[in-house]
Amino acid sequence: MQMRQNTIFITGGTSGIGKGLAEAFHKAGNQVIVSGRREDRLREVCAENPGMRYFALDVRDPAAIRDVARRVVSEFPSLNFVINNAGVQRRLEFTPGTPLDEEGLQDEISTNVLGVIRVAAEFIPHLVQQPTATLVDVSSGLAFVPMARFPIYCATKAAVHSFTLSLRHQLKGTGVKVIELIPPYVATELGGPRKTVGPGGPQPMPLSSFIAETMEALAGDRDEIAIGDAGNLVAATNLDTVKRAFAGMNR
Ligand SMILES: NC(=O)c1ccc[n+]([C@@H]2O[C@H](COP(=O)([O-])OP(=O)(O)OC[C@H]3O[C@@H](n4cnc5c(N)ncnc54)[C@H](OP(=O)(O)O)[C@@H]3O)[C@@H](O)[C@H]2O)c1
């Protein structure tokens, strides 16, 4: 895809992968608009990257997504690129005697699944009017092989993968390219303390390496971009076979 002169809206631009991509695209000569709930962080990111803009947005709120999408498109009619990146991860126990964390369950599903679907739905009518446009959904290697201590998180990412396959199919007659970005374990704020693993445990990919590899891959034309170890998890599911069956079912 074209890596310069895009107008890009990114959810979850206050830290980690979203902030890293926002800054990389900003440096590469794109108009970047970041969003997230923590307005102090949004202000900081924009102050550090003159010209970058922000809109405060909680993707669990459907009315707020509709309102922000309308305001972004009206202020930036050249918008041609949306990155659906906001996400949360929780450790949830389903062992006997552990009460269900109802609030955590709702938070993960509304952020990681409903948020992604609603952001896509609100921006698609504008994106299809552009000569070419891109929509990136951020899933995870854990969409393909779950890690049992994050049972809902992994299920939400499997949902993002499935939704993205169908969305790509539905939009194939338009100028919108739908990409799934599949990160491995990356050193960010996701899940909080889990990032502080000791020697011998799984080590996260440094954020700067992840961003560099992602930018290089986005400059190509792949629909699915699995970075680092995420490639092994995708390979474990034989995605090519799934896609052949998908093509057969969706002729
Ligand atoms: N790091 C990893 O190991 C890894 C691996 C695979 C996939 N991913 C995926 O990559 C994406 C980015 O995660 P990250 O690793 O960069 O984690 P992070 O540093 O915790 O960033 C998460 C971002 O999502 C935003 N966010 C969370 N809830 C939100 C809500 N309700 N509304 C709007 N924004 C919200 C946060 O902003 P506010 O708190 O300011 O709202 C923050 O900017 C996520 O989808 C995650 O699942 C990460």
Image (tube, rainbow, N blue to C red):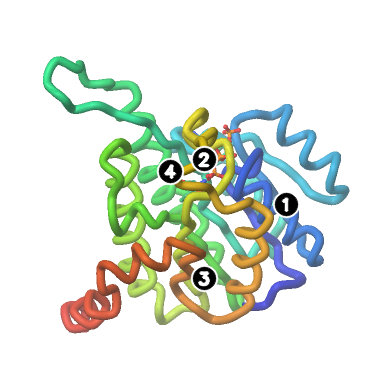
Residue tagged by mark 4? Answer: 115
Q: Along the polypeptide, which appears first: circle 4 or circle 1?
A: 1
* Amino acid at dot 1: Glu
Instruction: State the separation of the CA atoms marked 1 and 3.
Output: 18 Å
Q: Residue furthest left?
A: 96
Q: Along the polypeptide, which appears first: circle 1 or circle 3?
A: 1
Q: Residue furthest front?
A: 200
- In terms of depth relative to the viewer, which is nearer, 94 or 128? 94
Residue tagged by mark 1? Answer: 75
Q: Along the polypeptide, which appears first: circle 2 or circle 3?
A: 3
Q: Mark 2 or mark 4, which is nearer to you? A: 2
* Amino acid at dot 4: Gly
Against 14, is 50 above or below? below
- Determine whether the residue tagged by mark 1 lies in a helix, strand or loop: helix
Which x, y percent locates residue 149? Answer: 30, 36
In-image side of 75 versus 193 (left or right):
right
- In terms of depth relative to the viewer, which is nearer, 49 or 167? 49
- Determine whether the residue tagged by mark 2 lies in a helix, strand or loop: loop
Instruction: State the separation of the CA atoms marked 4 and 1.
Output: 22 Å
Which x, y percent locates residue 194? Answer: 47, 33
Q: Which mark is residue 199?
A: 2
